[in-house]
Amino acid sequence: MAKNFTDDDDVLLAELGVEVDAKKTGSRTPLEERIIAGFEEIQRFTEEHGRAPQHGEDRDIFERLYAVRLDRLRALTDARTLIEPMDHQGLLAGHAAMPDVAEDELDDDALLAELGVEAELPPIAELKHVRSSAEKRAAEEIANREKCEDFERFKPLFDQVQLELDTGLRETRPFEMKAEIEKGRFFIVGGQKAYVAEKGETILTDQGRTDARLRVIFDNGTESNMLMRSLQRALNKDDAGRRITDPTAGPLFAADAAEGDEASGTIYVLRSRSDHPMVAENRDLVHKIGVTNMDVERRIAGAHLQPTFLMANVDVVATYELYNINRTKLENLIHRIFEPAKLDIEIMDRFGRPVVPREWFFVPLFVIDEAVERIKDGTIAEYQYDSKQAALVRRVHS
């Protein structure tokens, strides 16, 4: 025999973000659930307007839809039996009075389609695919965004988060529980980053569940004053919905590791002793920037035999120790910064085969130092490398 849910079970499910309806003595079919959801919308309209929905050309399309739906529910015996116990407003007591509809007007099915409700034939149709009011409210709150007038306050936060994602200080993980929705947290919903800038006082819904009003800022410069449960539903419904983890504690670079810091590797900057004309003429400007998890001297041993070092010995001109960071992502970030200055030369390896080395850039050492400092203080996202000026310049945002 099936075990009934206890109050403790309901509380646990609610904390896990699972919608729990009032206890039922028996299960309902999907059709019955859709009929109830449709009738609840009519009840809500009646509460808001103090009257039942009515037909008429002067009524808006939503009211006309509810009027059509109410007529059909009154006419369907099975539907009346199902919803009569919840009809505290006496809506079913009226008579179905389908209005005369001109051919050029929206017919009943078209009216239903306006709200995403499909109708089957014959004329007195069964309602199907009626989204729950909670789902509609969540979708509407996500969609109904306004321009964020103070977005300049938040843009640096989004830039910093992207940098920390690029360097591995943050990661994206599947969204799991509503408890994760707190002020200062970042999420990805609908393909956009979302930042919870404000969270109001916790309230109790009619169903006894906790909720709160949020101010959510999106990275496209819009915002929404949505409920926490609406954001939760949107994240759960979005297959690509993610939460963005908090940054890993610890420095990016340090001369000395603090207690508990985990060494990740070393950024090294090299100059080549190659006699290649381009390298020889610009020896102080041509640098290799790489990241290694081994001792740098060991990494460059036998450089004159390796195409990656231009088949020549090299000098180490700068190193930066890494802690608590994804070195591969950081290396990729640095290479993207200096992509405009990437050296494009071809050399022959020791077997006489042509090779185009990577990780060599036509950039002054002091600019590399500046880039590292800007990665450390989180401002690198505001800059790009201008090869003509041989300098980092502020990005121009459209």
Image (spheres, grey):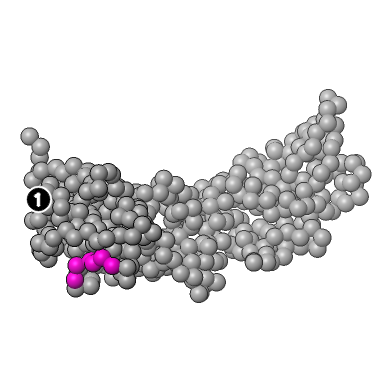
Which segment did they paint magenta? 51-56
Left or right: residue 164 compared with residue 242: right
Residue 224 visible from this viewpoint: yes
Residue at 80% over, 33% down: 355
Q: Position of residue 184 (x, y in %)?
A: 42, 64
Check residue 389 for magenta coloring. no
Check residue 54 for magenta coloring. yes
Q: Position of residue 312 (x, y in %)?
A: 83, 38
Nearer the observer, 245 or 219 = 219
Nearer the observer, 183 or 207 = 207
Report the residue that reaches farthest toward the top.
351
Q: Position of residue 283 (x, y in %)?
A: 86, 50
Quarter of the image that includes the C terminus: bottom right
Residue at 81% over, 38% down: 310
Q: Main secondary structure of the magenta part?
A: loop
Left or right: residue 189 compared with residue 109: right
Secondary element at image label 1: helix
Nearer the observer, 282 or 166 = 166
Residue of label 1? 81
**Callout 1, which amino acid?**
Thr
